[in-house]
Amino acid sequence: MKSDVKERIDREIRDNPITIYMKGTEMFPRCGFSAAAVEALRRAGAEGSIHSVDVLADPELWESVKEYSDWPTIPQVYIAGEFVGGSDITRELFESGELQTRVRNALAEREAPGQGSVE
Amino acid sequence: MSEAGSVRERVRERLERAIDGRVEVRDLTGTDDHFEVRVVSAAFEGKSLIERHKMVYAPLLDWIEDDTVHALSVRAYSPAQHDSFTQENEP
């Protein structure tokens, strides 16, 4: 993986509370798994705060994200800089309620860094 | 049900060889390249979801890479989890 691509991913997942590397865009997913992951994130409270990146538009990035996370499939979800998983795990965490918690914490952290959740 | 030599069958064989547990593989589209895999194994005990899924991906990486397996949905349960799950859903 080229170091500039690695730095791009480092920066992207750090600067955005919620990042998804997917096929297609948040508005127009081009794969059922990507669509399902976006839907789970929205329902978990992330709507309007999802940074989506279309790997179909950038083959080099596509290869690099797989290497970066040591994960062979797309989509890939990052919350607060941490790799969450693919479509199945994202949906499973939504069903258990953990996704909602992680999304809420990531968004609160962005509003008030270091202070936890504030009203 | 599935023919010997189908990708579905070979996926099942590889997973059974790699993971000690119960393996089910469904062909989601009838095209022998989109699969849903369910594995119940004591080897998942105490492992995170990411670790479990990686254990399922590991024996299939070359097929994921060359698109023999185009899409793979994974459910990986420990035996205890699976029991409570089936009890909840089968009154």
Image (cartoon, rainbow, N blue to C red):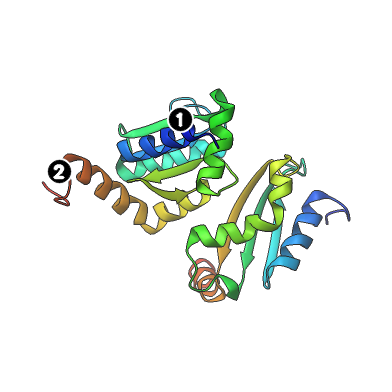
Give the image location of residue B67, x and y in percent: 72, 39
The residue that disc 1 covers is A53
| Helix, strand or loop for disc 2 | loop
Give the image location of residue B34, x and y in percent: 69, 44
Q: Is residue A20 left or right of residue A102?
A: right
Q: Is residue A116 left or right of residue A60?
A: left
Q: Is residue A75 above or below residue B80?
A: above
User: Can you tell which quarter of the image residue A12 is in?
Assistant: top left
Q: Is residue A117 above or below residue B12?
A: above
The residue that disc 2 covers is A112
Q: Nearer the viewer, residue A110 or A103?
A: A110
Residue farthest left in this picture? A119
Q: Residue at x 48, y 25 (%)?
A: A28
| Subunit that carries the residue with mark 1 | A
Q: Nearer the viewer, residue A73 or A62?
A: A62
Q: Three-letter amino acid code at disc 2?
A: Ala
Q: Residue at x 43, y 39 (%)?
A: A39
